[in-house]
Image (cartoon, rainbow, N blue to C red):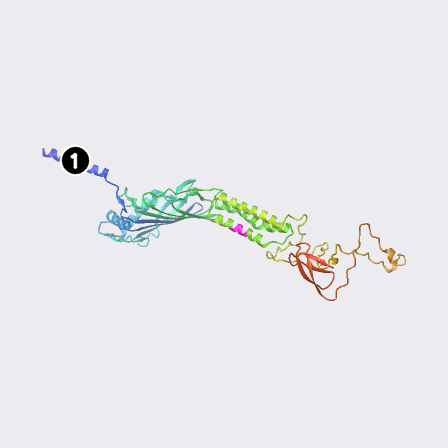
Amino acid sequence: MGARLLRWVVVAAVIAQLLLCVVAPVQAIGEQGGTLTITTTVQLRAGTGGGTLVYKLTGPVAHQVRLAIDEGFGDSDGTIAADEGSAFTSALDGEIESANPRFQGADITAVALRTRSIAADTLGLLGPSSDTGSMELSYTMQADSIARQQELQLGDPVLAQAFFDALPGTANRTFVGTVVLDHTTVIVGAETLSAPAADDGRLLRLRAPGAEIYTYHLRYTAPNPPLDTIVYSPFDPVESSLIIGLVGAIPLVLTIKLPGTIADSAQRVRVRWVHRLAWSLAGVDLLVYSLGVSGPLVLLALGLSVIVMVLVARRVYGPAVPGGAPAAGTPSLHRRGRLGRRGAPPPRAAAPPPWEDPTADPELIAAPPRQRPPAPSSSSQSRAPSAASAEPPLVEGEWEAPAPPPSTPRATSKSIRCTRCKQVFSVTIERRPMQVVCSHCGQVGLVR
């Protein structure tokens, strides 16, 4: 009777233990509060790379982790020795590698302590397990680029969960507290990240030709991470910083150069504010490109800048002059000078136009005087008719302008209106005829 009763007692005890295991609540670390900060920096170049990983625990959770390490990897003597700390970091290495975390285009393949020294790569881990200060662990990572296009979770909790899964006998442990993620990824090559949906975190994307930089900051309460996502592509011609940089260089150069080309074709002096506007639009386009705006929007902004500058230059300088291109070997106006500097254009083969003198209208000359033929030689004077009969007659429709007045003995000041820009300027007449230059537009004229 006693043996049978003993068997039933043993069976009841076993059943009770099984029931307790089934209905036992999940043990949670950090229920009293605390913060886990995870900082990562990854650089990918030509498909491979690496980076750093730093865990930092502050608050009550750091004390609870120390007690768990001392109990699971040590002898519960109240002190975490170097071998006990190394056992925990090795277990954490295995948990991270087996989890194979992926974030911002990086596929983490291997991790290890930064300098392979438990004392140099940890802060606050070794020592009394009753310590309530912060704890910090520094790792290096090896990473590869993800092979195919896919959507990634920016706030993936795999790194946070791996830390607590490394504690012995606590595979069902969870962290209840605050998690702070700070990720930085530098991609050099054709890979790109696009279509971000970061409503809870803060994502910053910087772009340069052939390189992209991403920073992501997130703060949330575990174990419920937000679902911020981003799309990784090994090659996307629309979003690749390298492709956009090469294609966008063409409209960027056109935005800067077209106003000067239109001014030269219209034979006009360049207006300073037009070219400042061109440089300003080019600067805005570069800023839009550098801040990681979507590729189609960057190309749209570059195209609009070209259209705006063409319309503005046509409006200011007018249409091109037919056949008005500078002669071969003749530099165009201000091509080598500063924008807006006024100077005289090179002399032209044709006679300069007359000036309009508002104070002396009779001085207006419509055309230069007709040239006389050379005088006959002395040997042919006997056979030549008289000087009056030798002068060739005027053809019908021609007229001869009066001879220019004698040179003035002293300088006089005159106000002259330019026939091109219609501006009045003052000149000092020292002789007649005299070539002068408009001080407003640089036009060359002749005062008789």
Identify which residue is drawn at 55% across, 52% down: 277
Image coordinates of residue 14 in percent, x first then y, are: 18, 37
Image coordinates of residue 259 in percent, x first then y, are: 59, 50
Give the residue pinned by disc 1. Answer: 12
- The reply, left or right, for residue 60 in relation to residue 206 is left
Q: Residue furthest front?
A: 359
Is residue 417 placed above or below 250 in the rendered structure? Answer: below
Image coordinates of residue 172 in percent, x first then y, are: 28, 41
- The reply, left or right, for residue 376 in relation to residue 77 is right
Q: Residue 280 lies in magenta, yes or no?
A: yes
Image coordinates of residue 89 in percent, x first then y, are: 30, 48
Q: Quadrant of the C terminus?
A: bottom right
Q: Which residue is nearer to you in this view: 401 or 413? A: 413
What amino acid is found at the position of numbered circle 1 in the picture? Ala
What is the secondary structure assignment of the residue under circle 1? helix
- The reply, left or right, for residue 212 in relation to residue 448 is left
Residue range highlighted in magenta: 279-283
